[in-house]
Amino acid sequence: MLQLALKNLQGRKAYSAIIIVAVAVAVIMALFTHFVTNSVRQELEGKRRMLGPDLALVPKGSKERGHIYLSKGPPAHGALPAGTLEQLGAFPDVDAAVPQKRLGLVTAGGVQATLIGFDPAADFVVLPWLDPRSAKNFPGRGGHVLGALVPEAGFALAVDGQQGVLGGRLLKTGSFLDTTIFVPKPAAEIAREPTWILLKLRQGTLLDAAANRLEVNIPGIEVLPRPEMFKTLNDQLYGLADGGAFGAAALLAIIGTLLVTGAMFALMAHERKREFGLLKAMGAKNTCVFKLIMAEAALLGSTGATLGAGTAVVCLLCARLLSSDLPSVLSSGVLHMLAATALIMVVAVLTALWPALVATRMEPYAAIRSGE
């Protein structure tokens, strides 16, 4: 059956080429859309994480001492009451909570830096700013992380009687992070007496309303919000990262190319009425005609899908070689890309289903007469 289908297609090269190209274009568009959407999502998610916390819980009285801005860093005095971190579990608006502990001050290379203990496993404030080019022993070997303005030359730091190990450096932030040295500490040690707890709220939560609820229901704390503008920007980036605009546009284009494929199959079947009539007059069953058309569709669909997938992968690999900033093809999800290719191939084959059913219903004599 496949040999007969292949022979028939060789005699209709123009139609076959149009169908193969249409399927290939649909696959290329699907894979490109998946790759671009995934790349944009990764980039936006990274930028969104760099916006930092929405709120900070600090010891009561910190505002009276003039500590009213989150960007100033943790307060120099006091600690949060025991159990504060556990009480946050009763607030559904809180998406993540990370405690940090102020360890003191140290002079490194002529710059007075603040020492802050943090838990790398739960952190969402420090790590997004970590410069990957400088990451040496972090987080695997627990190295200290220097702010952008803390000199690296001659770095030597003793914390809790241990010689400090340089783990990496942060990008410049314009905030207290620039003159801070972050020291990895066990989560339990930080949670016992945290200097402050940094909060990330769920999308759409109002900062002022959340801050008021926290201050009213948790004793011994005050809340430092960041400007509402940054929370709005954070929500907008979240919406962009999860948006389906790229997918919707690609879906419309893919549907258009598959409609072309279906139209070509219908046109081929219409022009071959006499052929199908002769086959049925010679004793061919309806199932034989149906299988012949679907076999031809399977050959064209698989050829077009393979061509499209190969072209897309080669183009993406070339783009990766030209720009190292682009994510690799593997990071875009090979299984998703294969699934998209297979789905388009199956849909392309199914577009021949209606023309095949119509061909099986033809009366042999009428089909032969219509082709005269």
Image (cartoon, rainbow, N blue to C red):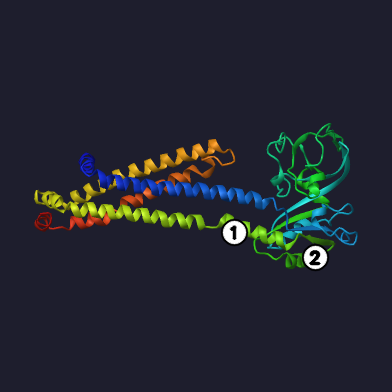
Percent across and percent down for residue 148 are 78, 42
For mark 2, give the secondary structure. Answer: helix
Q: Quadrant of residue 154?
A: top right
Image check: 86 left or right of 307? Answer: right
Image check: 371 left or right of 52? Answer: left
Percent across and percent down for residue 115 are 84, 44
Callout 2 crowding tier (Cα within 10 Å): few <14, some 14–19, many ≥20: some
Work out which quarter of the rendered image holds the C terminus and state it: bottom left
Of marks 2 and 1, the one in the foreground: 1
The residue lying furthest to the top in this view is 154
Callout 1 crowding tier (Cα within 10 Å): few <14, some 14–19, many ≥20: few
Residue 83 appears in the rendering? no
* Residue drawn 72% across the image and 48% down it: 123
In this rendering, the answer to whether 130 lies above or below 260 is above
Percent across and percent down for residue 51 are 70, 53
Image check: 323 left or right of 174? Answer: left
Q: Amino acid at mark 2?
A: Glu
Instruction: Count the labels in the image.
Output: 2
Question: Which mark is drawn over residue 229?
Answer: none
The residue at which mark 2 appears reads as: 215
Work out which quarter of the rendered image holds the N terminus and state it: top left
The residue at which mark 1 appears reads as: 239
* Between discs 2 and 1, the one toward the N terminus: 2
In this rendering, the answer to whether 294 lies above or below 90 is above
* Residue drawn 84% across the image and 60% down it: 68
In this rendering, the answer to whether 214 lies above or below 136 is below
